[in-house]
Image: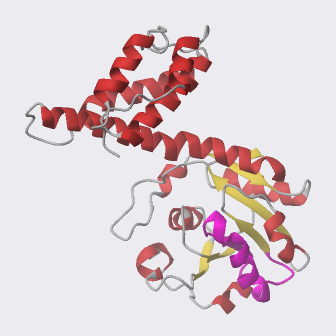
């Protein structure tokens, strides 16, 4: 049995909204309204929805309204949207950190509310407008869904499956934990990789290397392989100095290899945490990481 085709509206154009609009159109739904009070170039950012209304009142005609704003803007968006909802509508937001509680001001006036978030970061590569458009990147990805049991949860599951994803039900109170884990494995991972590339690039430049980018060239295969190993094998091991409990080597790398103080602080914190997670631990590395930094006065501040 085919689910009914919906008239869909977007309030806000952040994150995966543009790619999601393409995905919805691809499975037969109609995106009839795209509203973003902060954005004046909606038609450029949403080329797949040519002809969609841009005024907020058009959202009243939608069967499903998707709120595509950042987590910190969600409650303000709900307040702005409240005068334009109607009884037969479904309202969902795409934020990762929140469940359905922020939608409570709308719940009495609409058919149902849902919190949906595709666990794909980023969705493709940003175009010149900074928009993440790659709808194909959503194929086969998990979605966090939070909705009341019964019809609301069933609707969320059907919609996610139709978009090519698979649903992961998450209670309201656990959304922040899921969000923190996803951020730790994405945004923070990007920071670690960027720092590592900068360290290698700087050393290459000091040694007379003619070009930037050697760090990414060296780490590309290593980092991909390491991520595959970590995700495939919970009991993974890496023959690095922390896993070998080689405290002297860790100190040497820190003291002589990292002139930037902020990166050095991050290195110590991660060395400590890695030591804590090794099968046998290493108290020497943990004590070193917690002790005085012994910072070189020439180290950059």
Establish if 124 lies above or below 114: above
Residue at position x 74%, y 58% in the image: 98
Residue at position x 47%, y 15% in the image: 242
| Relative depth, front residue between 197 and 221 | 197
In the rendered image, the quadrant that contains the N terminus is bottom right
Which residue occupies the extreme front position in the image?
297
Q: Is residue 25 left or right of residue 223?
A: right
Residue 12: where, in percent of width, then height?
59, 75
Colour mapping: secondary structure
Q: Is residue 201 left or right of residue 150?
A: left
Residue at position x 70%, y 66% in the image: 93
Residue 56: where, in percent of width, then height?
65, 89
Establish if 109 lies above or below 143: below
Q: Is residue 285 left or right of residue 220?
A: right
Residue 137: where, in percent of width, then height?
49, 50
- Stretch of the chain drawn in magenta: 61-89
Residue at position x 56%, y 88% in the image: 54
Q: Give the image quarter of residue 265.
A: top left
Q: Give the image quarter of residue 8.
A: bottom right
- Residue 231 visible? The answer is no
Residue 17 counted in the magenta span: no
Residue 79: where, in percent of width, then height?
75, 81
| Relative depth, front residue between 80 and 30 | 80
Establish if 54 lies above or below 252: below
- Residue 78 visible? The answer is yes
Residue 63 counted in the magenta span: yes
């Amino acid at each position: 049995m085919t689910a009914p085709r919906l008239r869909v509206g977007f309030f806000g154009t952040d994150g995966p909204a543009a790619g999601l609009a393409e995905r919805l159109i691809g499975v037969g739904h109609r995106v009839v309204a795209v509203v973003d009070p902060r954005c004046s170039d909606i038609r450029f950012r949403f080329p797949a929805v040519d002809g969609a209304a841009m005024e907020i009142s058009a959202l009243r005609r939608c069967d499903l309204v998707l709120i595509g704003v950042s987590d910190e803007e969600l409650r303000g968006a709900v307040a702005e949207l409240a005068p334009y909802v109607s009884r037969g509508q479904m309202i969902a937001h795409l934020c990762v950190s929140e469940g359905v509680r922020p939608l409570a001001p709308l719940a009495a006036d609409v058919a149902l509310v849902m919190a949906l978030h595709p666990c794909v970061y980023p969705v493709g590569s940003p175009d010149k407008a900074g928009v993440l458009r790659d709808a194909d990147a959503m194929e086969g990805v998990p979605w966090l869904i939070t909705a009341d049991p019964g019809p609301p949860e069933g609707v969320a599951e059907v919609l996610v499956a139709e978009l090519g994803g698979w649903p992961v039900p998450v209670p309201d109170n656990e959304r922040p934990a899921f969000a923190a884990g996803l951020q730790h494995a994405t945004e923070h991972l990007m920071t670690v990789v960027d720092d590592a590339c900068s360290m290698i690039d700087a050393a290459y430049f000091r040694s007379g290397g003619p070009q930037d980018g050697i760090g990414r060239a060296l780490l590309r295969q290593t980092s991909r392989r390491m991520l595959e190993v970590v995700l495939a094998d919970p009991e993974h091991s890496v023959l690095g100095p922390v896993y070998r409990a080689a405290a002297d080597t860790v100190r040497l790398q820190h003291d002589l290899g990292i002139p930037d103080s902020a990166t050095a602080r991050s290195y110590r914190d991660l060395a400590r945490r890695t030591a804590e997670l090794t099968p046998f631990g290493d108290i020497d590395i943990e004590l070193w990481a917690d002790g005085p930094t012994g910072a070189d006065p020439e180290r950059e501040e």
